């Protein structure tokens, strides 16, 4: 399954200046009165075979980034390259071909499977659409993929409602895996599951990554999950990237004040210990009218004059450590 | 294939779990259809509904045996026993235009002379004949109207939801306009206007009921499509590379169509009721055509003396009630069975 000639470690996915504004319409004529700036000039890359964790609080644009990258949502501007292919400039039939390379796993396992389609057929649909092999071979691939996620052949004829949440999520993984993609966007794949099931699904994801050399963009809001699965972590705030570095560096040496605040909010499962919490003032501002300058400055405990005037660039301050903050040298 | 499937003779398992032989009927239908059929036959209410509908189907099919037509070229013409306006009570003697005596008559009735089993109505039309042959009329109009309105509604609603934006807006405003019209009145006027074109027949009323009957389906399917369009599994299909048309027909419509289907199954009863209402008001078939509405309309002039002539309203009225009730009961059961979340729960 490894692409020959490509080593683990070179860039597989590159996102440049990705922007997605959702128009807000109002009035009788449904004129565009404003934009929700869901994703505003976001750049990052994912290396082949690694897991990039993408964290941030609800509404910061994580999911929009993931979906726009797969062109499930049309972007406003920017570019995404996957394996050297510019995804946004593809025509319909080229895009269909490219879809074999990139898949997505959804958050809600109850909403992501068609209730009227037996799960074997759901898993096989991609193979049928792309006419991979003979019908017999497709069935074989489908069974094999189901076994990879811990399901049996006889499950294939059953309907989604006959499975538990964890099983459904594994079916969702099997569906994404059936086409043997290189790159999978995992859109909060475990946040709807019981804690006991979460680790099971995470371990399956890890095993599959090893076996098929998969590259993950792992979207989550749970930092301990991200710590468990990621090689590198990117942090978003209000449609912007604020920090991106390796897992060790991020957890040992967070540079951005927002990342520090996030870290301090991870609960410790020990009642005798307490972290030094960094409590942020106020709420996340509306993405309709984001603050000028650095978007974090109204809530930042260390903001200076400059932060409210100019927007800091997202730059590499030390090898493989990217930050958007004026106070980081 | 899979290593973890237990092998061996499973004696222990077989002792704990009772096995069931799969019959030829189940094998013939397949597991899914078998489940629907058995599910439909489980609740007493739906069995009642099926018995009623089955009875009416039987009556419709066997009409020529139950009461053979007096005029074989035009069996829907109700035979008249004279021209007197005064209704005759059930059991009175049939003198003129007597139908041939069918094989069941003598053993059941103990005589080989036809009587007016349910009486006659104004103009000496035989009520029994009208009800029996009117069953065929009811099924014909019901199916034609429901099928056509269902198809129109599905197409209009799907187009509206699928294209969205301006198209959706225009179509839905047209639907709104149609919905503002009072149904029976609008149908009555349209049927009256087009009657000269088609003559006195079933068509004016059928066309009128279709014209003003499709909006409910369009609205419901549109709403369901709009909600299903946003589900994750539609996005999952898109990310796999499924064509839009296939997404619509394979994933959206099968998930969206069932509320509409249930509505349609319930509607056969309602359509027959509306048709009877139009007929009662004098729109529709020519005088003497076997049609429940028409049989009912014969009672119009006798409304003040119904305590004497009760049979001219009770028999056709009861028939209509039983027919509509049968469809409603089945419609309810169908809704339960077709909902996949109800699988294994009935």
Image: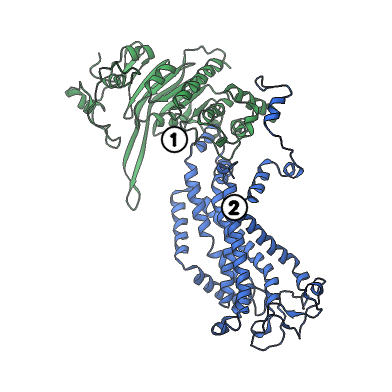
What kind of colouring is applied to the model shown? Answer: by chain
Q: Quadrant of the C terminus of chain A?
A: top left
Q: Residue furthest left?
A: A305
Chain B pictured colour: blue
> Helix or strand or loop: what does disc 2 sit on?
helix
Q: Which residue is mark 1?
A: A73
> In front: B152, or B131?
B131
Q: Chain of mark 1?
A: A
**Can you tell which quarter of the image residue B104 is in?**
bottom right
Side of B6 where A258 appears, left or right:
left
Residue A180 % position (x, y): 57, 23
* Vertical arrangement, residue B194 with respect to residue A257, above or below: below
Asked whether disc 1 touches disc 2, contact meaning CB atoms under 8 Å apart, the reply is no
Q: Position of residue A95 (x, y in %)?
A: 53, 31
> Is B153 located above or below residue A206 in the figure?
below
Question: In the image, are marks 1 and 2 on the same chain?
Answer: no
Q: Residue at x 20, y 20 (%)?
A: A302
Residue at horizontal 67%, vertical 30%?
B16
Residue drawn 57% across the image and 35% down it: A162
Residue pictured at 66% horizontal, 42% vertical: B32
The quadrant the N terminus of chain A occupies is: top right
Q: Position of residue A145 (x, y in %)?
A: 60, 24
Q: Which image quadrant is residue B210 in?
A: bottom right
Which chain comes out green in the rendered image? A
Count neighbours of disc 2 (C-alpha within 10 A) and say few if under 14, some if 14 to 19, many if 20 or more.
many
């Amino acid at each position: 399954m490894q692409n020959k000639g490509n080593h683990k470690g070179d860039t597989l996915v590159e996102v440049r200046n990705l922007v997605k504004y959702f128009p807000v319409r109002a009035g009788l004529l449904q004129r565009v009165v404003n934009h929700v700036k869901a994703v505003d000039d976001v750049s990052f890359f994912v290396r082949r075979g690694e897991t990039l964790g993408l964290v941030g609080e609800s509404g910061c644009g994580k999911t929009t980034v993931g979906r726009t990258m797969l062109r499930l949502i049309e972007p406003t501007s920017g570019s995404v390259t996957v394996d050297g292919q510019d995804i946004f400039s593809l025509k319909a039939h080229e895009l269909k071909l490219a879809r074999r390379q990139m898949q997505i796993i959804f958050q809600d396992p109850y909403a992501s499977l068609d209730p009227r389609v037996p799960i074997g057929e759901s898993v096989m649909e991609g193979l049928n659409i792309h006419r991979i092999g003979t019908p017999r071979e497709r069935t074989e691939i489908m069974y094999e993929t189901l076994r990879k996620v811990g399901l049996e052949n006889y499950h294939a004829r059953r309907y989604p409602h006959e499975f538990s949440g964890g099983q459904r999520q594994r079916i969702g993984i099997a569906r994404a895996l059936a086409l043997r993609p290189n790159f999978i966007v995992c859109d909060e794949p475990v946040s709807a599951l019981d804690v006991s099931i979460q680790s099971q699904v995470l371990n399956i994801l890890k095993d599959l990554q090893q076996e098929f050399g998969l590259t993950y963009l792992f979207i989550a809001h749970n930092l301990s999950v991200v710590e468990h699965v990621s090689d590198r972590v990117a942090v978003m705030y209000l449609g912007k990237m604020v920090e991106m570095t390796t897992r060790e560096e991020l957890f040992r040496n967070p540079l951005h004040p927002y990342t520090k605040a996030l870290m301090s909010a991870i609960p410790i499962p020990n009642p005798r210990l307490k972290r030094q919490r960094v409590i942020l003032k106020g709420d996340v501002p509306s993405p309709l009218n984001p603050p000028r300058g650095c978007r974090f400055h109204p809530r930042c405990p260390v903001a200076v004059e400059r932060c409210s005037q100019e927007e800091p660039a997202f730059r590499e301050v030390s090898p493989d450590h990217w930050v958007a903050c004026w106070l980081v040298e | 294939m899979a290593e973890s499937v237990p092998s061996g003779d499973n004696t222990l398992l077989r002792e704990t779990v009772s096995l069931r032989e799969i019959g030829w009927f189940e094998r013939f239908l397949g597991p899914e259809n078998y489940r629907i059929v058995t599910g439909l036959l489980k609740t007493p209410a739906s069995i009642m509904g099926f018995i009623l509908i089955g009875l009416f189907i039987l009556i419709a099919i066997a009409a020529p045996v139950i009461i053979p037509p007096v005029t074989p070229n035009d069996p829907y013409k109700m035979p008249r026993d004279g021209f007197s306006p005064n209704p005759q009570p059930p059991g009175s003697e049939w003198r003129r235009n007597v139908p041939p005596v069918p094989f069941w008559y003598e053993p059941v009735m103990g005589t080989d002379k036809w009587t007016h089993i349910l009486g006659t109505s104004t103009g000496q039309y035989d009520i029994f004949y009208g009800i029996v042959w009117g069953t065929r009329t009811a099924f014909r109009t019901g199916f034609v109207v429901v099928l056509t309105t269902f198809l129109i509604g599905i197409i209009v609603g799907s187009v509206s939801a699928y294209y969205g934006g301006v198209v959706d807006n225009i179509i839905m405003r047209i639907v709104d306009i149609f919905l503002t019209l009072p149904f029976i009145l609008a149908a009555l006027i349209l049927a009256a206007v087009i009657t000269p074109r088609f003559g006195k027949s079933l068509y004016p009323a059928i066309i009128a009921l279709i014209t003003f009957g499709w909006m409910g389906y369009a609205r419901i399917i549109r709403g369901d499509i709009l909600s299903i369009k946003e589900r994750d599994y539609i996005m999952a299909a898109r990310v796999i590379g499924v064509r839009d048309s296939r997404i619509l027909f394979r994933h959206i419509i099968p998930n969206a169509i069932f509320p509409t289907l249930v509505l349609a199954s319930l509607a056969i009863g309602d359509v027959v009721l509306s048709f009877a209402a139009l007929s009662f008001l004098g729109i529709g078939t020519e005088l003497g055509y076997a049609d429940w509405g028409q049989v009912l309309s014969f009672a119009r002039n006798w409304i003040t003396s119904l305590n004497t002539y009760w049979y001219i309203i009770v028999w056709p009225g009861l028939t209509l009630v039983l027919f509509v009730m049968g469809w409603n009961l089945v419609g309810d059961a169908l809704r339960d069975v077709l909902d996949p979340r109800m699988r294994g729960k009935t």
